[in-house]
Amino acid sequence: MKLEGLDIEVVTIPGAVPAFGADVDASQWTRTCLQAKEQGGRLVALWGSDSAEGGLAVHAALVTRTGLLVLALPVADGFYPDLSELFPAANRMQRAAFDLLGISAEGAADRRKWLRHAAWRADEFPLRKDFHAGRQPPASGHAATADAYPFVRVEGEGVHEIPVGPVHAGTIEPGHFRFSIVGERVLRLEERFGYKHKGIEKRFEEMDYMQGAKLAGRVSCDSTVAYAWAYAMAVESASGTSPSPRASLLRALMLERERIANHLGDLGFLGNDAGLAFGLSQFSVLKEDVLRLNAGLFGHRYLMDAVTPGGIARDLHADGVALIREECDALEETVRRLKSVYDEHAGLQDRFIACGRVTPELAARLGLIGCAGRASGQSWDLRVEYPCIPYHELEVRMATHRNGDVAARVTVRFEEVFESLRLCRLLLERLPLGEVIVPLPAPAPGAFGVGWVEGWRGEVFIAFEAGAGGRIQRCHPHDPSWHNWPVLEHAVIGNIVPDFPLINKSFNLSYSGHDL
């Protein structure tokens, strides 16, 4: 079959979201991506793979009018056409694909190392099947020479550089921020990540499809429900099964609780970064209450391992339903009072308004997604655009604003908390009786499935390919931070250096989701 406006043959990928796959050649790769872009589509993810049967390949997942389109392009010579001119977010994904597999985007302007950090030799690629993790690391002298990262230098009278990180205070994960400034005004920010490359994608290949669920939930642990659901969705897609109605509603309930907890925590820290410690103390109490109830009802504060292929690991009983309803009522009342405090606090609004602005035009050009994208006029939420069960019946009210500054991102978070509380009540009202887990057969070797879930930060995507004997041939998890970190570099331009922590927290992107 052919999708509307796209000149390639596609096959349907069964599952909870509308998805299609196509094997393409290099000219079709470029042409299809251009057509998708011209029709308002965008890049979801780009990654590489290696298999004994098909060899090296590059893959791209695109949003189209009809749904998700996953392209596969064999790269026997190691080269494929660059997509970063069409989709700027592709730049870092392409660089990571080279570091991990040695496949190169031909014609790309930026081909610097991204992930390697001299952790393996320059001529080795850890996601290739012939790579052995037990070999000796490169000698220190060679490592230091090979890993001298060429940051872009800004020249001019009065220009200074401020290097921040990769080691930070507290428990924050490592990331390097290189500021070029005049006085306190930021001329340019350049980021570098990958300092804690965890080898997650390689580890998947050593697991079976059930073991992989635990690892998927640990890619970026503040989004464990979103990742676990996307992984379960992909495995269920590959095996041709569906969770029970009760399990689907409980997954959505957990996802909305994850969204609430993270927004509460960030709203507190945003108040604190702008000088209102009262906000941090109040929202920290609210978040802690949510986490404690999670632990009591589902066995883990952050809902780790609650979602599993085939359903969920732990049911919710009648007393738990009553407790969540009571909590929703109490949370809504308190958060509305705190929103009034934030809205009417002159000092807070002075710091928030016009700070770290990303215009709708810039957001569209760079591919900003998730709650940060919706604060910059990007009306996109998977729960609305391509709703899976049970969101297709909930009529999710998407929160959007156009100012694109810290104030807009704070407002979107408040509105999403209120909407998630409404959705939690609806889910509890409609919760059916029935089993919470169904038998899940091992996907057939070569079976392919995708998962696509609107997490609290933005859409989480997983591509899953089954191997023999229930093993995982390839699993690629993709965090929305891949798209949004480059936008942060633009958001800080023209602001003063002391505002960077506030701007950074208003996005609150994942380091861990970058460092696979």
Image: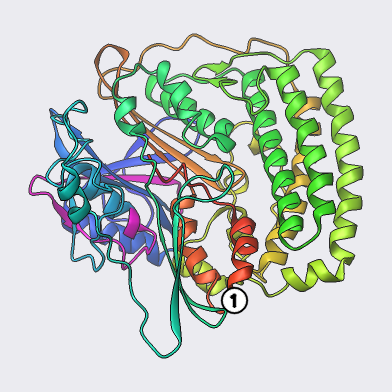
Q: Residue at x 82, y 14 (%)?
A: 318
Left or right: residue 479 compared with residue 255: left
Q: Is residue 165 left or right of residue 56?
A: right
Q: Considering only vertical position in the picture, is 210 above or below 328? A: above
Q: Residues within 10 Å of mark 1 (few under 14, many from 20)?
A: some
- Residue 40 at least partly seen: no
Examine the image and state in which quarter residue 354 appears.
bottom right
Outermost residue on the front side: it is 141
Tag 1 secondary structure: loop
Image location of residue 23, percent across then percent down: 22, 43
* Viewport quadrant of the C terminus: top left
x and y, in percent, of residue 124 in the image? 14, 40
Front residue (pair 232, 242):
232
- Residue 241 shows in the view: yes
Frontmost residue, 459 versus 147: 147
Q: Amino acid at mark 1?
A: Asn
| Residue where numbered disc 1 is placed | 495
State the residue in front, 399 or 131.
131
> So how many labels did they put on this image?
1
* Residue name at image x 61 percent, y 72 percent: 357
Task: Please tell me whether residue 262 belongs to the stretch shown in magenta.
Answer: no
Name the outermost residue toward the left.
77
Q: How far across and down, in percent of the image, does residue 101 sit?
A: 20, 42
Horizontal side of 184 relative to 198 (left or right) equals: right
Asked if residue 425 is positioned above or below residue 139 in the image, the reply reads above
14 above or below 239? below
Residue drawn where x is 15% and y is 49% of the image: 142
Where does the magenta region start and end?
Answer: 65-92
Magenta span includes 85: yes
